[in-house]
Amino acid sequence: MFHQLPLVEIDGMKLVQCRAILSYIAGKYNLYGKDLKERALIDMYVEGISDLMHLILLFPFSPPEAKEKSLATIAEKATERYFPVFEKVLKQHGQDFLVGNRFSFADVQLMEAILAVEEKVPSVLSGFPQLQVMMLLNMFMFRNHTVQRPAVIVSPFCVNQYCGLFNKLPVFMFV
Ligand SMILES: N[C@@H](CCC(=O)N[C@@H](CS)C(=O)NCC(=O)O)C(=O)O
């Protein structure tokens, strides 16, 4: 449509634009909250996580002399801005998942971001016990949430950006 990738063929549609694609799939597979309020929370968390992912995605394009600084920024933003929010949410409501006490799109996105940061900073979760537990539970949920994959066409860049879990979890449910 806009001459861009990714493009997903699903339910007789050819969908482009990542947010539209992910929202549709999240809704279709019951990962998008039970009502508008839960959906708003999920969107809020997903967008926050996307801001962190944006830093990670830009990392490969930073010049060699800027790599160390970029890495330090990723680690700092993850541990001081983003991860504490999710650690606190999980601790405060005492549930296993971010929203509505069930696995959602927000958990999927957070898991992807954590894996992406851990790839660069392996000890990044050491100060986040709730997130460590959440990661284990989410691994389990992924295994049980496998769905038939729609046809998807992505560029190598987008594979990295939006389907990062492919490398680690071949059962990843969406694309
Ligand atoms: N807002 C779009 C951005 C898509 C995008 O930038 N795709 C890149 C590849 S990952 C592309 O197709 N670039 C070619 C172009 O824009 O001409 C989305 O979220 O899907």
Image (spheres, rainbow, N blue to C red):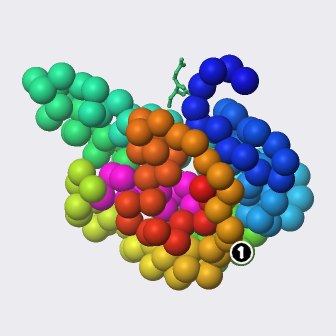
User: At 37% across and 48% down in the image, what residue appears?
Assistant: 78
Q: Is residue 83 visible?
A: no
User: At 77% across and 65% down in the image, what residue appears?
Assistant: 29
- Residue 115: say if magenta: yes
- Classify mark 1 as within 8 Å of ligand 1 or not, answering yes or no: no
Q: Nearer the viewer, residue 72 or 107?
A: 107
Q: Callout 1 environment at 10 Å: few (<14), some (14 to 19), or many (20+)?
A: few
Q: Is residue 127 left or right of residue 132?
A: left
Magenta span: chief secondary structure: helix
> Image quarter for residue 169?
bottom left
Residue type for callout 1: Asn
The magenta segment is 108-118
Q: Position of residue 16 (x, y in %)?
A: 69, 34
- Residue 63: say if magenta: no
Q: Please identify the quadrant where the N terminus is shown.
A: top right
Q: Position of residue 138 (x, y in %)?
A: 53, 74
**Is residue 53 positioned above or below 168 on the image?**
above
User: At 74% across and 55% down in the image, what residue appears?
Assistant: 25
Q: Please identify the quadrant where the C terminus is shown.
A: bottom right
Q: Is residue 60 left or right of residue 33?
A: left
Query: What element does badge 1 sit on?
Result: loop
User: At 73% across and 57% down in the image, what residue appears?
Assistant: 26
Q: Quadrant of ligand 1?
A: top right
Q: Nearer the viewer, residue 168 or 133?
A: 168
Q: Nearer the viewer, residue 164 or 128?
A: 164
**Is residue 97 positioned above or below 4 on the image?**
below
Q: Is residue 141 left or right of residue 23?
A: left
Q: Which residue is mark 1?
A: 101
Q: Residue furthest left?
A: 65
Q: Is residue 105 left or right of residue 118?
A: right
Q: Position of residue 45 (x, y in %)?
A: 62, 49
**Is residue 98 positioned above or below 162 on the image?**
below
